[in-house]
Amino acid sequence: MAEILLFHHAQGLTPGVRSFADDIRATGHIVHTPDLFDGRTFPSIEAGIAYIGEIGFDAMRERGVRLANELPPTLIYAGFSFGVLPAQKLAQTRPGARGALLFYSCLAISGEWAFGPWPDGVPVQIHGMDNDPIFVGEGDIDAAREIVEKVEDAELFLYPGDQHYFADSSLPSYDADATALLTLRVIEFLNRV
């Protein structure tokens, strides 16, 4: 049994994010889904990003990092898009991390914006669509490829399509087939770490 700290995307803790967490819980794992937006959800990525901008990206990321202090250190950190910011920071900097699951986004592990190198012994899976204008178009795929190249237990999974939030069943961008495969891969990952 794994224990996961799962951070939502910029539209908030939507019913689709909750449903994804419930699907993982149904396989026997513990999933924590903190609400970084205090109950707010947004109708679009842009509206959610605007809200995050009001609070401050760093402040919002650190809100997620602080939440981890209430939980044991031996967590798997997971995040959807914006939620990758606190998840990846925690996976790279909080001692005891057991793994990371990064959905739709990825940060480089070298360069100006990096949290530093990837820690030894922390496996990671990165998932995105091969024509997602954000994941591919904004360079996250390059960061993902850097991790796969430099980290021993790292996998990048690309799904056909151009949607960003494709595993959120409450949004129009949902892709049931891609989500089924993503979920299978995530469960296999959780069962082995």
Image (cartoon, rainbow, N blue to C red):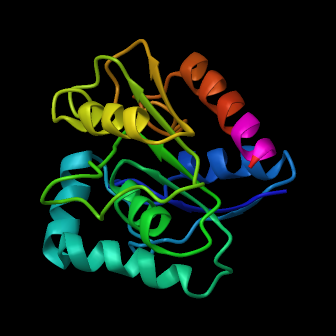
Tell me if residue 27 comes above or below residue 50 in the rendering.
above
**Magenta part, dominant SS:** helix
Q: Quadrant of residue 87?
A: bottom left
Eyeballing the image, is 101 above or below 7? above
Residue 157 in view? yes
Q: Which residue sits at x=40%, y=58%?
A: 83
Q: Residue 20 is drawn in which quadrant?
A: top right
The residue located at (49%, 63%) in the rendering is 91
Horizontal relation, residue 72 to residue 115: left or right: right
Task: Pick whichever, 36 or 28, lies toward us.
Answer: 28
Residue 165 visible in rendering = no
Question: What residue is shown at x 22% (from left), y 74% (from top)?
Answer: 58
Task: Please say if 2 is above or below 175.
Answer: below
Q: Is residue 191 magenta?
A: yes
- Residue 53 in the magenta stretch? The answer is no
Q: Is residue 137 left or right of residue 99?
A: left
From the viewer's side, name the closer residue of 95 and 2.
Answer: 95
Picture coordinates of residue 107, whole percent (x, y): 29, 49
Q: Quadrant of residue 124?
A: top right
Where is residue 66 drawn, in percent x and y?
A: 45, 85
Residue found 46% across the figure and 69% down from its top: 90
Rendered location of residue 61, percent (x, y): 32, 72
Looking at the rendered image, the quarter that the N terminus falls into is bottom right
Magenta span: 187-192
User: Measured from the top left, where is residue 192 in percent x and y?
Assistant: 78, 43
Looking at the picture, tell me which residue is in the foreground, 183 or 106: 106
